[in-house]
Image (cartoon, rainbow, N blue to C red):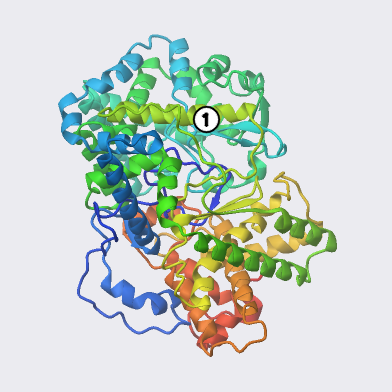
Amino acid sequence: MNTSWTPLKRAVALALCGAALAIAPAHGAEQAPPPPAKAATALPQVLPGDDFFTYANGDWLARTEIPADRSSWGAFAEMAETTNARIVKLIEAALADKALGGEPRKVADYYAAFMDEAGIEAKGVVPLKPVLARIDAIKDRAALTRALGASLRADVDPLNSTNFQTENLFGLWVTQGLSDPDHNTPYLLQGGLGMPDRAYYLTDSARMAELRTKYQQHIAAILKLAGYGDTDARAARVMALETRIAQSHATREDSADVLKANNTWSAQDFAAKAPGLDWRAFFKAARLGGAGRFIVWHPGAVTGIAKLVGSTDVATWKDFLAFHQVNHFAAMLPKAFGDQKFEFAGKTLQGTPQQSLRWKRALAATNGAMDDAVGKMYVERYFPAENKVRLKQMVSNIIAAFGKRIDTLTWMAPATRAQAQEKLKTMYVGVGYPDRWTSYAGLKVVPGDALGNAMRAEQYHYAQQVAKLKQKVDKTAWAMPPQLVNAVNLPLQNAMNFPAAILQKPFFDAAASDGTNYGAIGSIIGHEISHSFDDQGAQFDAQGRLRDWWTKDDMAYFKQASEKLVQQFNGYKPFPDLAVNGQLTLSENLADLAGVAASYDAYKATFAGKAAPSDADRQFFMGYASAWQTKIREPALRQRVLTDGHAPAQYRTAIVRNLEPWYQAFNVQPGQALYLPPDQRVRVW
């Protein structure tokens, strides 16, 4: 799931939770407000062995309602609200300090321009006219190609399964090569869809048919607001084009297969392998003319889309470009544009009844434009040095515990074990904030120019990404800003990031017991370590090179054990007509399982011969389950099940059914819903 973090700086990321993105809290408040309360209606008592998620979170579930401007609510959202409440105060203080300069001034001016609703309304569509004029000026396929190239943005992350495609014609990702970790390489991915996935265009069901109808109506409404005529016919043509694009797209499961993605094409290969598009002109317009090699993640889609560029009339492509440009920047345009976009993307797709308030959207947009500048302001004020020290120690303890688990694996050959230990030994761990901050010295922020600021910020980010092609690979580069409530494993860098914002209650509480902290943040740390050894991460060696470092027998066992977890999650059905996709969610499920196990081992090691509290194990597992407190609206849950690499929270909590200490801690017995006989419990790491 994505919110408003654009551009999303998560290259090479295997993320903890795609929904864990910060949304702004109550304006000017020091602490986040609670969600709307309702009279507590106690949920029926359940046994931990029947429903551990409800057992641990029943009181919270009974008293909590999802805020009207959210599609879901939970522990991640609460932390994000607290974080952004603090950030709002920092920005407001910067606005009040007229003598302030540098990046804090740019942050304040960007935020203020977005907040200036009256100024935006007064300008109307005037700021949009140069954008639309450039599209209207397209007269032939050569000009179309240049426009398509110029519209490319670096806004996809194929190793994070929540973001496999973009509304632009193609997605661009710049990072080190899969087989060449010493050089940065441009990756080209499928794009061109305004709905979340190909399934929304191609699935034959009443619900999807209704969504397609409403999306086409949304296209027409946006074009009408922008001043176009005959919008129903234009929308029909754009919808038909996107449907043909969707037919060329790879599935989510295929997109997650890195081996299928490792396709190196020279710049000259594109003409023969993907005819229909003047690739030389396209790459020149996209500022990629100097790139000699590309990794084509979705060759079928690239070929199919290029063919459509050559065969579909220019007028339809102009409508496609116009719609997506206006739709993309709707939040910076008069209120009617943002309201229309929310009507479809918020209400229709995710079931969110109410649009978030203006200041929340302003903060999200500012984060998207200058995330590191905002993050620097946050950590200087709100991330104590002692928290970083304590978290680093926890990381060290859990890495050590994971290493001991590797040493005890009876199924792993010595050669494979040595390679796995080398990955742990050389892993870079970033805690709190990056070693080097992104500079925004060259970004022009103009007071009162919301749309111009957004466009310049995107171009500035894109230029930074393209510039990486001439720079050395930075193994310590961060993929997340400090104010993001999330965590990430970077298999190509053999690195992990734990942003400052996730290192707070309820995941980390300096006053809480070790059991609670190891169950919550410790399991997240273990989760990210484990991503280096899940079905994707295990394909990369200690240097981040895509390489088979496993013996044949070891890999056979790993795949067999993984398949048991696939089948376990295939059995979960949040709706009668929709089941969890065990293959799509495998990476995250493997990481959850190994992460909880490694954190548990590290927690037990902290006693070092001392007597543990009688409820130590219960504290640990309750800390883990409480961290997954979540409520979600049905449309949003359906979207996540279809498109997200993370299983719904209640099933992630149930991963404990594979761990013997959980059975002992809660006296789980045969006949209870989560009980698994010992021979059916999955253990990989």
Q: Residue at x 37, y 55 (%)?
A: 83
In front: 522, or 514? 514
- Outermost right residue: 414
- Picture quadrant of residue 608: bottom right
| Side (left or right) of 389 relative to 234 | right
Dividing the picture into quadrants, the one containing residue 220 is top left
Q: Is residue 138 above or below residue 70?
A: above
- Looking at the rendered image, the quarter that the C terminus falls into is bottom right
Residue drawn at x 38%, y 36% is 194
Residue depicted at x 70% and y 49%: 540
Taking the spot 59% from the left edge, 71% from the top edge, the residue there is: 599
Q: Position of residue 352 (x, y in %)?
A: 27, 52
- Is residue 589 visible to us here? no
Q: Residues within 10 Å of mark 1 (few under 14, many from 20)?
A: some
Q: Position of residue 401 (x, y in %)?
A: 67, 70
Instruction: Tell me the quarter of the picture where residue 244 sits.
Output: top left
Residue most toward the top? 139
Residue 296, image x and y in percent? 61, 32
The residue under label 1 is which amino acid type?
Gln
Q: In terms of depth relative to the viewer, which is nearer, 33 or 357?
A: 33
Q: Secondary structure at mark 1?
A: helix
Above-or-below relation of 603 to 479: below
Point out residue 433 in the picture as x, y percentages from the top left corner. Answer: 51, 50
Report the number of discs. 1
Above or below for 457 versus 524: above
Can see residue 305?
yes
Is 324 on the left-hand or right-hand side of 269?
A: left
In the image shown, does 306 or 191 lie closer to the viewer?
Answer: 191
Disc 1 designates what residue? Answer: 464
